[in-house]
Image (tube, rainbow, N blue to C red):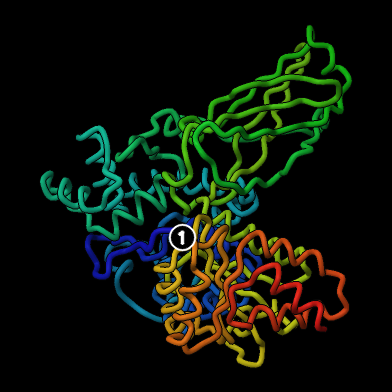
Amino acid sequence: MPKGGAREASDKYAVSKAMGLEYFFETLNLLHQENEKLFQITEVLNELNKKFAYWDDSKTETCRGTLKELWRFGFIEKLDNQNRKIQLNEKSWKTGSGFKYKISENGKRVINEGSGKFTINVAKALFETLEKGIFPQLKKILDITKVKGYFPVSSTEHVAISKQLNLYVEEHAGKSIKFGLLESTGIFFRKDSYFYLNHAWINELKINNFLFDDTQKKLELITEKNIKKSFIEGEALDISFKILDTQINYKNKIEIQINLFSNFNFLFNIDNIEIKGEILNLKLKSLFSSRDYTDSSILTLLGFLEVSIENDKTLIELPKLRILTDDHEWELKICEIFKDLNLECLHLSGKSDRPDAILDLSNDVNYENVLEYLRNADKEKLMIETTIGEYSFSKLKKDTSKFINHSTKVLKISSVGQLIVANTFEKNIAQKFEVFRNEINHNVTLIDYENINYLKKYRYHNSFKQIIKNLMISSKYVTKQLIDNYFSIS
């Protein structure tokens, strides 16, 4: 997710530092859970930190920015210290204190429609802000795109072009909008070094109510309902339904059409659709690689199937998809391997101010307050840094240098050391690590993908968790031989 927002107000109704659909949705969902309550900023901050450890609890600016963007979208209301509703204007956007927030009727509708349509609702809200004149930085970006026919992916280039056209868009504000809002909602699509407007999706947002009804249950989804994965160009995405309506087997009476929403029409081709017995198989083909896509997305409905039997037509939802970068997917994969070993592993949102994940060694994770757990020195834990490719010695030195910052800044994690996880390590890294270890003032252990999986061999050992703890804080390069030695002497 891009770090958004200008460090100084760079325009009227300046965009906030909070640009991630996941943060928007979870914040709105919190307000919806107690929809008559008036929330102060610190209450929102503390409640979300208990569940997700999103933000530094000593600073409210990012949480405030999230609430302001939801206010701009019309999803929440802002009230003064006498509980009077505040009208959004240039003055109220940038001044005042003691505010409270509550979910609006529009926000309740958005949450009730679910996370799968949240991207759609945000995209529609963006165009409503343009009509109201309350998002000038967004208007400038769209105006530049109309003049040039494109908008640069490069922030340096977009700043230069915006100055040339007298439509200045500050660097960080532009990053927030183009990655965190326009690309993640499908209004922008990326090709090489430039963004282009997805006109088909913009038109679809204007005319489509996105309503579905499968009360007769003709099909049942048998693959994942929520797909979270990365893609390479040409990769297939397979989706399967079980046919519940026997009439569907009579091909002369039935028509099945896949309708991808147009925010996905530059990302996937419909490659194949076929019926085999009681199974309907769909195949989509990726037109992009995740490395060239924002990681600010959220689970989003792909589209729908239009099933027609004679004159009876039913619209059936396709799965929800979240496109991950390959390194994000790798982090989740590593966490799942540890969980398969009956070890608690918490993935943290991918930011430079925090590690990729936390491996619990205490057997006592406090899921009622994740932030408190992370900071509790009595709960032994390891910070995890990962790499999907070959882990180099230079990256090892860089990652170990982050330890103090992770312990003292933002989340202020209390940890007994670091676990470095890689698919593979650079040749001779064990020897280099042995020498370098003397320069490190905390525990650092190295393990690769093959050897994490090798641990499964001992998962039913009586002292498994204690031995794993000893192994993970050994400050060694973990090999099969080392694992065997630790378990053989117990």
Q: Nearer the viewer, residue 372 or 457?
A: 457
In the rendered image, the vertical position of residue 125 relative to residue 367, given as above or below? above
In the rendered image, the vertical position of residue 223 relative to residue 414, given as above or below? above
Q: Where on the picture, by quarter, is residue 352?
A: bottom left
Q: Quadrant of the C terminus?
A: bottom right
Apparent side of residue 106 relative to residue 479 in the rendered image (left or right): left
Tell me the residue at 77%/36% (across/down).
221
Outermost residue, top side: 252
In the rendered image, the vertical position of residue 235 relative to residue 127, given as above or below? above
Q: Nearer the viewer, residue 487 or 353?
A: 487
Q: Which residue is mark 1?
A: 70
In the rendered image, the vertical position of residue 403 relative to residue 215, given as above or below? below
Q: Nearer the viewer, residue 342 or 452?
A: 452
Coordinates of residue 417 in the picture (x, y in percent): 56, 83
Coordinates of residue 283 in the picture (x, y in percent): 65, 28
Apparent side of residue 7 relative to residue 116 in the rendered image (left or right): left
Q: From this viewpoint, is residue 83 visible?
A: no
Tell me the residue at 43%/86% (across/down).
439
Q: Quadrant of the N terminus?
A: bottom left
Tell me the residue at 58%/70% (across/down).
357
Apparent side of residue 418 relative to residue 68 in the rendered image (left or right): right
Q: Amino acid under label 1? A: Leu
Q: Where on the picture, by quarter, is residue 421?
A: bottom right
Coordinates of residue 224 in the picture (x, y in percent): 72, 43
Q: Where on the picture, by quarter, is residue 63?
A: bottom left
Q: Nearer the viewer, residue 440 or 66?
A: 440
Label 1 crowding class (10 Å Cα cut-off): few <14, some 14-19, many 20+? many
Q: From this viewpoint, is residue 426 visible?
A: yes
Give SS at disc 1. Answer: helix
Tell me the residue at 80%/83% (across/down).
489
